[in-house]
Image (tube, rainbow, N blue to C red):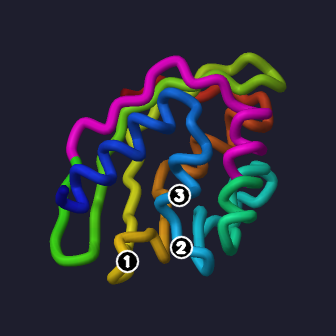
Amino acid sequence: MTLVEQTRNVYDAFSRGEVQTILDNVAENVEWGHDSVATEIPWHGLRHGRAGVAQFLQVLSENVEFQHFEPYMILGEGNEVVAFIRMKTKLRKNGIQVNQEIVHHSTYNDQRKVVRFRAYNDTAHSLMAWRGEKVPASV
C-alpha cells in the first residue's frame, strides 16, 4: 500500500469517527496541528505525541459538527503527502456553518507513521465564525 492509499484510509477512518485508527498511524513523537495565531479557536495550535492528537480530535469533536468532509485529491512524493479537502462544518457553540477548502501536509517516518502534520486553511474565516461574526460565502 502506498502512503497516499494509507492516508486515504486514515481519512476514511476519520469520517467514521475511528480515533484509534488515526492514532495507530501517527508516531509517538508526532507534531500535529495548525501553525496559527488564531489560538482563540480551541483546536488550533500545535500538539505533541499521540496524546496530543487524541486531545485535538476530542476538542474538534466537542466544537465542530462535520456535515461534509471530502479529501478530493491526495498527492505523495517520498515520505510527504498533501491532501486537498472540501468540508462543510457547523460550529456547536453558535450554529454558524463554515464551508472551506483546506490543505493537509503529512510527513511520514520509515515506519510509515506520521511524524509531522500541518493543516492549512483560511484562519481569518474560521476566526470570524468562531466569534459569531457573519462569514462570507465560500466553497
| Magenta stretch in the rendered image | 56-73
Which residue does the image show at 26% across and 76% down from the upper left?
79
Residue 73 placement (x, y as % from top left): 21, 44
Q: CA separation, marks 3 and 1?
A: 11 Å
Contact check, label 1 and label 2, Cβ < 8 Å? yes
- Examine the image and state in which quarter residue 69 appears: top left
Q: CA separation, marks 1 and 2?
A: 9 Å
Which residue does the image show at 47% across and 23% down from the upper left?
137
Indicate yes or no whether the magenta region holds residue 126. Answer: no
Left or right of 25? Residue 134 is right
| SS at badge 3 | helix
Q: CA separation, marks 2 and 3?
A: 8 Å
Left or right of 74? Residue 86 is right
Residue 52 placement (x, y as % from top left): 72, 64
Residue to which mark 3 is pinned: 24
- Residue nearer the viewer, 62 or 17: 17
Which residue does the image show at 68% across and 46% down from the upper left?
57
Residue to which mark 2 is pinned: 27
The type of residue carrying mark 3 is: Asp
| Up/down of 33 relative to 98, above or below | below
Left or right of 130? Residue 31 is left
- Residue nearer the viewer, 102 or 125: 102
Which residue does the image show at 29% across and 60% down from the upper left?
82
Disc on res. 111? 1
The type of residue carrying mark 2 is: Ala
Query: Pointer 3: residues within 10 angstroms few (<14), some, or many (20+)?
Result: few
| SS at badge 2 | strand
Indicate yes or no whether the magenta region holds residue 58. Answer: yes
Residue 124 placement (x, y as % from top left): 60, 49
Which part of the image, by quadrant, shows the N terminus?
bottom left
Circle nearer the N terminus (3, 1): 3
Residue 76 placement (x, y as % from top left): 19, 64
